[in-house]
């Protein structure tokens, strides 16, 4: 099939139009993703109510830690605080340090108009 061209002026302009549409769609989706990088699904307010309960428990554990003198009890309270803090982080939708890297702005080349 030497000498047979896969592209003609007609299908080249069609392909260019499809390419530009796909580029615009990707840019739109990228901007949507940048607007809300992390979302926590709200299941009828369950996540919000659970988050509130976990934060109340954390406050209680913090108060208990300040009053406690026994090393064993302090260790158990510190472990409970670590577990509750992890639950709170997950429910609040915060990633682990270094797990989420914000996207760098990419330079965009000007697009030629299709006639």
Image (tube, rainbow, N blue to C red):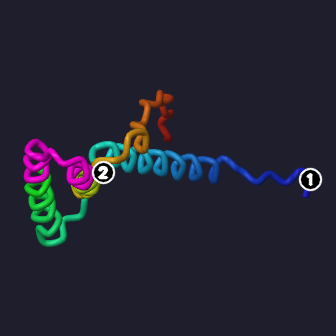
- Marks 2 and 1 sit apart, C-alpha to C-alpha, by 52 Å
CB contact under 8 Å: marks 2 and 1: no
* Magenta-colored stretch includes residue 101: no
Residue at 18%, 71% in the rendered image: 43
Range of magenta residues: 59-78
Q: Crowdedness of circle 1 by 10 Å Cα count: few (<14), some, many (20+)?
A: few
Task: Identify the main secondary structure in magenta.
Answer: helix
Q: Quick one: 14 or 20, which is closer to the camera?
A: 20
* Magenta-colored stretch includes residue 63: yes
Where disc 1 sits, the SS reads loop
Q: Would you say residue 39 is visible in this rendering?
A: no
| Left or right relative to 8: residue 65 | left
Q: Is residue 104 above or below residue 5?
A: above
Could you say which disc has been placed on residue 2 in the image? 1
For the N terminus, the image quarter is bottom right
Residue at 39%, 37% in the rendered image: 102
**Which residue has dot 2 on it?**
38
Query: Which residue of the protein is positioned furthest toward the bottom in this rendering?
Result: 44
């Amino acid at each position: 099939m030497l000498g047979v061209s896969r592209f003609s002026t007609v299908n080249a302009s069609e392909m260019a139009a499809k390419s530009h549409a796909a580029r615009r769609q990707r840019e739109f989706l990228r901007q949507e993703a940048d607007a809300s990088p992390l979302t926590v699904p709200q299941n009828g307010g369950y996540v919000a109510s659970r988050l509130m309960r976990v934060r109340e428990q954390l406050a209680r554990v913090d108060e208990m830690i300040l009053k406690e003198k026994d090393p064993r009890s302090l260790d158990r309270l510190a472990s409970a605080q670590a577990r509750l803090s992890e639950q709170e982080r997950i429910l609040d939708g915060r990633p682990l340090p270094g797990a989420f890297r914000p996207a760098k702005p990419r330079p965009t080349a000007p697009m030629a108009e299709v006639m």
